[in-house]
Every structure is written in structure tokens, then in C-alpha cells.
Image (cartoon, rainbow, N blue to C red):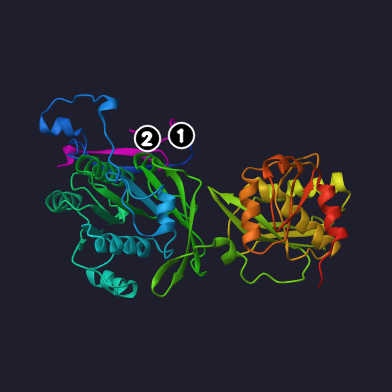
Amino acid sequence: MLKNRKTVYFCQECGYESSKWMGQCPACKAWNTFVEETVSAKKSSGAGSAAGKTGGRAEPLKLNDIRLSEDERILTKITELDRVLGGGIVPGSLVLVGGDPGIGKSTLLLQVCRNLALDGKSVLYISGEESARQIRMRADRIGEFNENLQILCETNLETVREVIERKKPDTVVVDSIQTMFHEEISSAPGSVSQVRESTNILMQIAKGLGVSIFIVGHVTKEGNVAGPRVLEHMVDTVLYFEGDRHASYRILRAVKNRFGSTNEIGVFEMRNTGLSEVKNPSEFMLNGKPNGTSGSIVACSMEGTRPILVEIQALVCQSNFGIPRRTAVGTDFNRVNLLMAVLEKKVGIHLASCDAYVNIAGGMKMTEPAIDLGISLAVVSSCKDIVIPDSVMAFGEVGLSGEVRAVSMAAQRVAEARKLGFDTVILPEVCRSSMGEQKGVKLVYVSWIQDAIRYIMNNPGKE
């Protein structure tokens, strides 16, 4: 038995295999990522192509001979999820869903299984972490299920393969990939080799049988899916569930999608009956916004094709330390420092001796440069104790010279502001030509950050 085993080292980042330990991976250049594992010297049955298993000869196909049907995608009946997936589930696709523990990954996928089962699709839910009774308890909170959903509590991948090939379901959910193991690989479940081999086998099943497979992946403390980085390269779509597990909202974001855009997000609210869709994220994020306070303004960021209005809060006060404190929550810390340097140099507002705290209310993480103008105005509002009217919304990128630069989809941002009752929008002058006529909202075009600051100082709100 010992002769059939060997010790190898795997890189946890990219899956690179080496016969000896190395401090730096020669493939991905990451440091201290090699782990030791004992594997079987026998070739795994999961490797190899489908043609090689059947003894047939692989033949290429002409691209023009491949036909796509009109009903190529399967709708999950969860609009936010369908939006992130690019319009629905593609048959034969392999989707990885990652997120923090307790964020709602299993709940979301169980809701997907319920909708697909009620729509007449056969669904197989494979659990390696929970018992059938635990799954049933969660299912009772979500709603009623029919006989099209079947549960399999199993971690042996060969048994899972046999059941899928025998039942031939339309959709399979594997929760989670870190619990699956292959008998011919001697390392423990969740190791680099086990995760890589398990994903490879599931990928062959999905492509060979045309089964849509969702796999749940645990994440590390850095927020990345645990296991080799090659796992994300093998799957078709990578979805991340974001948000504070103690808060009610959840954000589903696609970081890789071979069948759609990676800019779309889905917003959910966690309730006792499961995850509920948030149809209007802007209204949800602005809920509870205080009226008549300084250091607060509403800005607009585009997530894919969807404009989302968020409240930007800033608090500026004199520092009691030799080095002022700067904190940014929900946006890039370095970007906030850059904007404060622009205000110091180009506008003449002295912030070098002040503590500054910037927060995107609601817990959203926004990195689009279009919120630069909102951050700058919020900082000025707090520093000068000027109340910005509650009916004002601002967007625009701020350059190092203090100029307000153009952003994309300006008309959609203004339309979203008008829909939520804002009557004044501060936006870049260079967007004037693309705006056209906008009724019911006043457009204030600015070319420099000084112009926007002058406007809010001449038109303050009421406390």
C-alpha cells in the first residue's frame, strides 16, 4: 500500500504541484502557500476526457453547425438571482457560490430548488454537512415543496456520480465542495487535491449530461473561496454572497460569469421565511436617512445596468493626536485620502489637522469613481457645518486638479433620482450633451469641485 502513495506539495492559491516544498510558488509567485499532502500514485478515475472513457475518437464540430434553442436558459423565478446569472441558469453550467458562514448560501439555493421543483424540473440536493432532518427544518420555513426535489446526504463522490447518472436531474446542488472526497485520493476532504479533483468530476458530469450544478464553497478569513485558486478557473460562474450576517440585507455579486455580465448585483433581505428580493435597492439603502444634518448627501453609483442611490456620511473634527485619524467604511480608503488632498490643495479647506470618517450608510461597498463628488461634498458639509438639502443628489468623478469628470449612464442616474423624489441633481458639465430634456428635476452642471461647493454654500438646507 505504501508503494502506491507519494508525498507531494500543492500551492493553495493556484494548485501548482511540486515534489518538494518551496517558499514561493513558481506559477503564481505567492509566498508560503505550499501544503504537504499524501496522494495515491494511481491515476484518478475522474481525470481524462469523455472520449477516452468510451473508447471513441474525438471529433471537432463546426461552429456554424451548433444550434442554440430559444429556451436555452432556465429561470429560477428569483429576479435578482436571474439578473446576476445573466438571464437564468444555462444547462450544463457549473456555478460556484461562496460567502461567509451563516450569510444565506444554503437558504438561497434551497429557495432556487423549490422554485425549480414547482416549475416541474427535477432537482437533486446533495448535502455533505447537514442531515436530511436539518434540511427539512429549513425547508419548512421557506414554504411547501413537491416530489420533484430529492435529498441525498453523501460525501463520497463516486456515489454522487452514480446517483446523478441514474436519476438524471435537471439541476444539482452540492453543499459543500469542501466536504466531498474521492476514494482514490488519500488526502483529507477539503484539501487542495480533493477539492480540485471533486470539481473536475462535477465539471465532467455537468458538461457530459447537460446538468446544471451549483456548488457551495467555504471562504477563508480574507473572503476568498477556500481551496486552490484553480477552483474558480474551472467553474463557469462564481457568485459571492456579501453582507454582515447580523444585518438584514445581503448582496449577491458575480465576480466571474461566462454567460453574462460581472457588473450586476442582486440585493436580498433576510427574513424568518428565507431571503426576500429587494426590488428597489435605492429606496432600501436610503431608509432611515436623517433630515437636516450636516455631513450627509445622497450619491449615485451604477452596478451593471442598475443605478443605486446611497447615502454618504462624513464626520470631520479637530484631531487630538499628532497624526489625524482617517477611516473609510464602504469605500476605498486611499480614494478618500486623495479627495481630501484635493480639497486641501485646490479648494483651500484645511483638513491636515482634522480627523475624518467617511461611511457609506447601509453597508454597501462602492468603489465607482462617480461617488467622488458626493464624498467631497459630504466632507465639506461636515467641516463647514453646512446642511445639504435633502432633495439634492450628486455624482461625478473628481480629478487631481479639482475638475469634475464625466461618468457613464448619466441619464439613468438622473431618472433614478427623479423616481425617488429628488428635485436637484449636481452632475458634471461634460454630461450636458448626453442628458437631453429632463422634466421635474433641476440639473446643476459643474466643471470644478469649487462650483459644487459654492452651490451648496449658497443654497443650504434647513436643520
The relative height of residue 296 versus residue 191 in the rendered view (above or below) is: below
- Three-letter amino acid code at the position of disc 2: Tyr
Residue at 19% across, 38% down: 44
User: Which range is magenta?
Assistant: 1-29
Q: Residue at x 81, y 67 (%)?
A: 461
- Mark 1 to mark 2 CA distance (whole Å): 8 Å
Location of the C terminus by quadrant is: bottom right
Q: Which residue is mark 2?
A: 16
The quarter in which the N terminus is drawn is top left
Query: Foreground residue, 168 or 120?
Result: 120
**Residue 26 among those drawn in magenta:** yes
Q: x, y percentage for residue 211? A: 23, 47
Mark 2 surroundings: few (<14), some (14-19) or many (≥20) residues within 10 A: some
Circles 1 and 2 in contact, beta carbons < 8 Å:
yes
Secondary structure at numbered mark 2: loop
Q: Quadrant of residue 205?
A: top left
**How dense is the environment of label 1, judged by Cα within 10 Å: few (below 14), some, or many (20 and up)?**
some
Looking at the image, is 240 positioned above or below residue 268? above
Closer-to-camera residue (319/125): 125
Residue 314 location, x and y as percent?
A: 74, 61
Q: Nearer the viewer, residue 170 or 19?
A: 170
